Image (spheres, grey):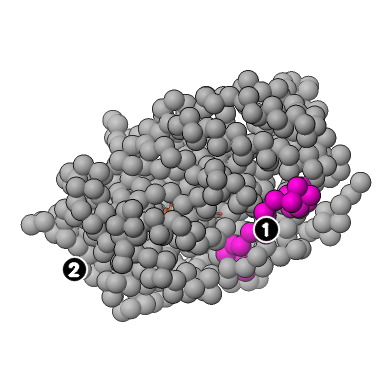
Amino acid sequence: MTLPWTQSWENKGRDDERQYPDDVASLPAGCEVDARTVRRPIDDEVDFVVVGSGAAGATAAHTLATAGYSVAIVEEGPWVRTREFQRDFYPAMKQLWRAMGTHVAGGRSLIPYMQGRCVGGTTVINSAIAWRAPSAVFEDWSTRWGLGPEITERALDEHFTWLERELSVRSVDDKALGGNSAVFALGAAKLGIESHVIQRYDAGCDGSASCSNGCRTAKKQGMNITLVPRALRAGAKIYHSAQVRIVEVRGGRAVAILAEMNGPGGPHTLRVRARKGVIMAASTVQSPNILRRSGLRNAHIGQHFQAHPGVSVAARFKFDVRMDYGATQGFNSLELLKTHGIKLESLMLPPELAIARLPGLGPELMDRFADYSRIAISAVVIKSEAEGVVSERFGAENVRFSLTQKDMRNTLEGLELTTKILFEAGAEEVYPGAHGMPSILRSADDAKKWREGPTDTRAYNMVMTHLFGATRMAKDPRAGVVDTRFQTHECEGLYVVDSGVFPTNLGVNPQHTIMAMARLAASRLC
Ligand SMILES: Cc1cc2nc3c(=O)[nH]c(=O)nc-3n(C[C@H](O)[C@H](O)[C@H](O)COP(=O)(O)OP(=O)(O)OC[C@H]3O[C@@H](n4cnc5c(N)ncnc54)[C@H](O)[C@@H]3O)c2cc1C
Ligand code: SF4
């Protein structure tokens, strides 16, 4: 049986005639310095230096540049252009992913955490899902965490609205939904549970199912083709492939950043003086380490790290699903969010990763892999209560994080419901991929087996892509690192605007809330 959504697909390639927003010819002359080509130290001065060009950094830089300030963005990763994005996953990981996706959080088990390292940061490799954080999260921040009245849903509303308009937030189009999301939708509808199509930063997704490689047709509205180029056109400049080592602090005030450039004859130093402020947006893993290296000593730096660990379930259908076509993620369910902190979602994995989710070895594994076109994958995303720690060890980043028993019991609820969704949609086999569970479930009734499933995280292959909290916000310096103006309690003119400032995780994908918070922070500096 062939389903209708698999028939008309054409995986569009790049349009070589088209001018992309990240083409050098689209940008003002002299706005970009590629530190790999620099042969001597550089000393520069601007109003604001922004460290990092991902969701938070690009948004802050754009807001300040369009308000008329001189802005320099300093980004550790290279600027990989739309024309250079790869169709295959491994070369893309090499180009765009921090350490090729090999960083792991240690603890009870090893959990990889994934980040982008390039101009545009993680927005270049993410699935472009745009969610406003639920009202309950803002109420919690306002009341239990005491951030009101400065940080409220109301204060963020205009920023969410602006982002939704400017970055084309829209529901995945029927034509680009793809079979993987369609089976999720079908199964959820048959079970009668809450589910709906996902909203994304999407200017006409072609359904190439390869958001993690960078969007080769510039349909995904990542920061690399939106707010970074727009900030540059408004007068900002960018130093990329330059790693910020420290913020220079004099008399309790941030005065400059020092970065390392590995050009010919290097390393050379990039020093950018900041007349008005240094804005940290290097992510919740890298920002706290830069603060510590810069001499800040607030006890909460690097503490309270939170995440949304995720685990996936694969299934084989009787018919073609064609996971290689469609928006990378297209359908989700919040049925278990309020009760168990669990979000369920369809998730396309490329063949290189999908094979790791199939059972068996040797010929048995190869037989199953040959059925890639009939495989579907869904993910369980956990709003965990666990807190971890970010630090540096022998000069390298070090994250410690272990899920709690309550987190694991919630995970099992999510896995049971996902399994039911897949069987309702017509799966003939579901592959739990967890040590201690049967390697194959054959009927909806088997979903109950998750009730006795393992609660030891070592039994699972989890990953973390949403990271929070390691420079958390609190009005009292004894409770957090930054105040409600996003300024560090210890150092004037030093701000943190990435998701490190979130006092809790969200339960939904964070990019939208990160950008709204960064825009709020920057607009209050204008
Ligand atoms: C595979 C994947 C899929 C995801 N899908 C979604 C999704 O669909 N929707 C969603 O809402 N979220 C998604 N996320 C999460 C989301 O992309 C991130 O939460 C968000 O981009 C974080 O924003 P940020 O600005 O804090 O960090 P980033 O976007 O990671 O940007 C930080 C930047 O700082 C740079 N940097 C770090 N250290 C230094 C330094 N020392 N000097 C200079 N620069 C430095 C980094 O190279 C990077 O470019 C996904 C994440 C992953 C990994
Ligand atoms: S699936 Fe992702 S990469 Fe492919 S066209 Fe759509 S937005 Fe671009």
Measured as percent of width and height from the top left, residue 317 is found at 82, 39
Camera-side mark, 2 or 1: 1
Report whether residue 87 is seen. Answer: no
Q: Which residue corresponds to the image point at 48% horizontal and 29% vertical from the top-left?
A: 405
Q: Which residues are magenta?
A: 185-203
Please say if 441 is above or below 122. above
Residue 392 seen anywhere in this rendered image of the structure: yes
Q: Which residue is mark 1?
A: 196
Q: From the viewer's perspective, is 442 left or right of 452?
A: right
Residue 47, which numbered label? none
Q: Secondary structure at mark 1?
A: strand
Q: Residues within 10 Å of mark 2 (few under 14, many from 20)?
A: some
* Marks 2 and 1, how far apart at CA: 47 Å
Task: Identify the residue shown where x is 47% and y is 74%.
Answer: 162
- Residue under label 2: 275
Q: Is residue 150 left or right of residue 459?
A: left
- Whether tag 2 and tag 1 are in contact, CB under 8 A, the answer is no
- Which residue is drawn at the image coordinates 23% and 48% (left, top)? 479
Q: Is 199 inside the magenta-drawn segment?
A: yes
Left or right: residue 283 versus residue 45 is: right
